[in-house]
Amino acid sequence: MLVLCKNRSIINLSLSLSLFAPISFKLKRVCLMDTSTPFDVVTIFTILLLSYPFDIANANSEGDALYAFRRAVKDPNNILQSWDPTLVDPCTWFHVTCDRDNHVTRLDLGHAKLSGHLVPQLGNLHHLQFLELYENELVGPIPKELGNLKNLISLGLYHNNLTASIPPTLSNLSNIKFLRLNNNKLTGRIPRELTKLKNLKILDLSNNDLCGTFPTYGSFSNLSQQSFKNNPRLTGPELMGFVRYDVGGNCK
């Protein structure tokens, strides 16, 4: 809504911008000296843009990413009912936390009985620090695009039905401290790139179907074997200086 005040008279004007992305404006008061000046839609929209600074592109990108995830899952308990795609700002949605600049920093949907799959668009939440989707019924692979979440501190995907291999791109999560992928159906070798995660404090890959050996150097040097338990096809720690971990054997 735009409020125009002309010679002390106030005109309330509701503006519908059907040609643009849905935008929610805070109330603004604009005083105009010349009451005879005509105002068309383009003029009023320009005033709104100049009088209320915001980042449309960023808000749309994050909202689109979250809504893509909503479309990819079934939500029997209507946990995501507040995720309204007509709102630019997803910070009003339940289970979404934002910072002062309206960037999405947390997504908390643990134990929500969601089924479906993860989507690559989640990698567009560049300010995300906590992605908690544990104890659901998610299936399919972990998108390699999650490696774009450079600010991520915690990734909780445990107790789902995720399959395929662990994407090496997770080694780009330079701020990650807690990486929990346990109790899924992940297969393949443990990417050696993960040993570069200098801030990693807790890693849990237990109760999957991983194969080969697990590294004992880099950030993995401080981890116990409990991080890898109940992977029947894991043959133990990698012996440095001997046969390379990726040579031989049926490990897929």
Image (cartoon, rainbow, N blue to C red):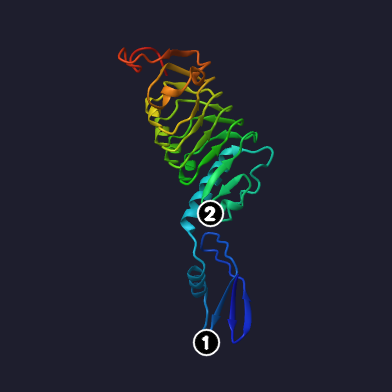
Q: Which residue is mark 1?
A: 34
In which quadrant of the rendered view does residue 22 lie?
bottom right
Q: At 45% across and 25% down in the image, what residue appears?
A: 165
What distance separates the C-alpha of mark 2 from that of mark 1?
Answer: 36 Å
Rendering coords of residue 35 (x, y %) = 55, 87
| Mark 2 neighbour density, 10 Å: few (under 14) some (14–19) many (20 or more) | some
| Front one among 248 and 195 | 195
What type is the residue that disc 1 sits on?
Asp
| Mark 1 neighbour density, 10 Å: few (under 14) some (14–19) many (20 or more) | few
Rendering coords of residue 167 (x, y %) = 42, 30
Q: Give SS at disc 1.
A: loop
Rendering coords of residue 228 (x, y %) = 49, 19
User: Which of the two labelled residues, at mark 2 and mark 1, occupies the earlier sequence position?
Assistant: 1
Q: Give SS at disc 2.
A: loop
Rendering coords of residue 143 (x, y %) = 46, 34
Dot label at residue 102: 2
Vertical placement of residue 94 versus 50, above or below: above
Q: At 42% across and 40% down in the image, what residue appears?
A: 148
Question: In the picture, which quadrant includes the C terminus?
Answer: top left
Question: In the picture, which quadrant includes the N terminus?
Answer: bottom right
What type is the residue that disc 2 sits on?
Asn
Asked whether, in this view, residue 105 is left or right of residue 110, the answer is left
Q: At 50% across and 32% down in the image, what residue appears?
A: 178
| Front one among 31 and 38 | 31
Label count reads 2
